[in-house]
Image (cartoon, grey):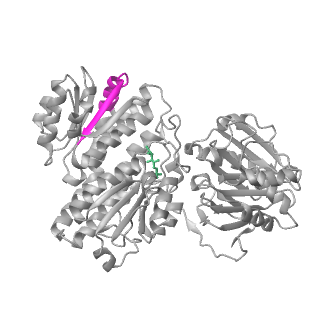
Amino acid sequence: MCGIVGYVGPKKAVPILVQGLKRLEYRGYDSSGIATMNGEGPIFVHKRAGRIREMERSLPSPLPSTSVGIAHTRWATHGPPNEVNSHPHLSSDGSVAVVHNGIVENSSTLKKMLRSEGVVFRSDTDTEVIPNLVARFYEGDLEAAVKKALHLIRGTYGIVVMSTAEPGRLVVARNGSPIVLGVGDDEMYVASDAPALIAHTRQVVYLGDGEVATLDSDGFRTTDLEDREIDKQIDEIDWELEEIEKGEFPHFMLKEIHEQPRSILRGLRGRFEREYGDARLGGLNLTPREFFDIRRITLVACGTSYHAALAASYVLEDLARVPSNVEIASELRYRNPIVDAKTLYLAVSQSGETADTLAAMKEVQRKGGKVLGIVNVVGSTIARQSDGGIYIRSGPEVAVASTKAYTSQLLALVLLALKIGRMRDVSAGEGRELLEALEALPEQLRSVLDEGEQAMTKLAGELAHAPFVLFLGRGINYPTAMEGALKLKEVSYIQCEGLAAAEMKHGPIALISDGTPVIFLCPMDQLHEKTLSNMEEVKARKGRVIAVGNPGDERVQALADVFIEVPRTHPLLSPFLMVAPLQQLAYHTALQLGRDVDKPRNLAKSVTVE
Ligand code: F6R
């Protein structure tokens, strides 16, 4: 959602800030702005509603030659997305500028207090109280003033503060909204997400909740709100700039779909114990005894991550023989969950910032449960809040519609299932068989994707005008049906539903009439025969059967109006191959309908509000 960028150093700040904001565009926003200054000010503020390029185009020429600045992309919460409400916000005396992600819950009380002291508020935002509090508390030490202000604030924040009283300095603080510092040579960067920094430095520091950092061109110092020094480790970003650039692809979504062979390979690298048919996963922080004692696994997630978790629950039950259930995070968090010591909780999140997932995991932890994070973004809030976990290593995902993270999440969870399974009923031979099938996946995926491009473009032409599309699957491909439906609806805006195939006859069959497209996931597994019966039922009602199946499946081929072939694999791995053409189909349908594929309407990449 909202994005933050800041810079202090010898270079011109404005181009760095604008470029950084553009790298965060994918998060979703509706206005943007920058604040910079030279020497003792005044602070130059420039903001616009709409796209960053509008804000950039309207900048004065020549650009102010400043070497310190802060910038923001806003996704409106308090007050409409207009110029006044966009960040940065200034104190009413103009001395302090702030960008803020998060929510100041007690802003109305604070506004009342500040108004009584003569402060005039210009915007409808909660944020505007922060620069005014900092200005009020300033007595010759910006860091101290920020800390005093934060002591009064209830809510969540990632903030960057700049003041005319201490030019060449930024004060940064975090509580619940991500902040990463970038360490350069005689310069410092700050952002809400690493993609905004990577063009300048790979050396980063992830700020924790309750931490404050003061940056100037010589470096940074970190303390807590009580002024105790904190020693921070400098991490190295382990992905490349090209990964957040489209390269030869017209859209990030298409690029990320085609990256899957590579992201799967990356997720597998170094994670095999070939000889023992086992998975090697560092970072779980579970003793062998704790592994042994797991009696239940509860996965918690939202959206696409929920679908990956649901598919994984089948694998966990099959391989690990541990009862597994999946909870929608927003439901779990308010349900007063019954937490017990022998249940292992898994929070699954690409961004690691989803508010509902984070709140659900905190609720479980508060009750003494152990939660592992299955996360993509290194150093994200969920990764930090976890008691251990697995990084899925899919690389940065920029398109709002999640594709490569889905298969990488599933991969990490399959490896975990194997690891638990190998402590129980899975033999070394069975483990090796699964590992071999996993190793073959990248090549198989590549061939599915290569062949799928043309076929899915053609099928998209047909689906683009359908008012409704139904996706059906059974067993481990029931979640694939749900994910296929979510993908198509979110980027094309076509009404879609993904169901367990047998559920169709309990109601949704009423929706099927002449030509209704019904997409079946039908691998040659133990449920093949059953899915075929459901196909017959659709055929009998003149529905249009589109089937994703395996080569040589003559019965499905004979029934289907359109047959999409994907290679056979281990029965537990079929979702990896079945979902790929559905992702391509969603992309091409959206494209043909002229949708904004990478930024579908109303959606944000990470949902950091309830
Ligand atoms: C859909 C999509 C969302 C996310 C959901 C959870 O394509 O991306 O449904 O999966 O918002 O996000 P994370 O995984 O970041 O917790």
User: 442 or 79: which is nearer to us?
Assistant: 79
Q: Is residue 217 among the parts visible in the rendering?
A: no
The percent coordinates of residue 145 (x first, y second) are 80, 65
The percent coordinates of residue 447 (x first, y second) are 28, 43
User: 302 or 548: which is nearer to us?
Assistant: 302
301 to the left or right of 564: right
Q: Is residue 570 above or below residue 124?
A: below
559 to the left or right of 498: left
The residue sitting at 80% across, 42% down in the picture is: 122
The percent coordinates of residue 101 (x first, y second) are 65, 52
226 to the left or right of 209: right
The percent coordinates of residue 425 (x first, y second) are 18, 70
The residue sitting at 40% across, 34% down in the picture is: 489
The residue sitting at 12% across, 38% down in the picture is: 553
Q: Does the magenta stretch include residue 469?
A: yes
Residue range in magenta is 454-473
Q: Does the magenta stretch include residue 305?
A: no
Q: Is residue 348 above or below residue 249?
A: below
User: 452 or 513: which is nearer to us?
Assistant: 513
Q: Is residue 343 among the parts visible in the rendering?
A: yes
* Residue situated furthest top in the rendering: 514
